[in-house]
């Protein structure tokens, strides 16, 4: 049975990829806010995601 506090693998992968992408320098500076906003939404929905890094 899956626990409520578990973070799905897909979410963890997406979160990690967003961090890699945001730090790569490949993001258009005018659009970096969208990437950071996505990271913030994941952190809001899964508060324990930072601990699992």
Image (tube, rainbow, N blue to C red):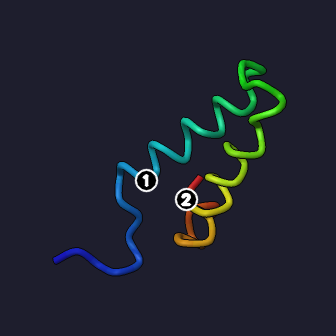
Residue nearest the viewer, comparing 47 with 33: 33
Residue nearest the viewer, comparing 14 with 49: 14
Spatial CA span between label 1 and label 2: 12 Å
- 51 w.r.t. 32: above or below: below
Q: Residue furthest top?
A: 26
Q: Residue furthest left?
A: 1
Residue shown at the point (69%, 54%) measured from the top left: 37
Please tell me how crowded label 2 is: few (under 14), some (14-19), or many (20+) other residues with Cα within 10 Å: few
- 6 w.r.t. 34: above or below: below
Residue shown at the point (62%, 52%) measured from the top left: 38
Q: Position of residue 14 (x, y in %)?
A: 48, 44
**Which comes before the other along the chain, label 1 or label 2?**
1
User: Which image quarter holds the N terminus?
Assistant: bottom left
Q: Position of residue 11 (x, y in %)?
A: 43, 53
Residue shown at the point (69%, 45%) measured from the top left: 34
Q: Position of residue 32 (x, y in %)?
A: 76, 37
Residue of label 1: 11
């Amino acid at each position: 049975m899956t626990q409520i506090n578990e973070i799905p693998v897909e979410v963890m992968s997406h979160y990690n990829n967003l961090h890699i992408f945001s730090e790569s320098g490949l993001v258009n500076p005018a659009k970096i806010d969208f990437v950071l906003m996505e990271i913030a939404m994941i952190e809001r929905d899964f508060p324990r995601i930072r601990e699992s890094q």
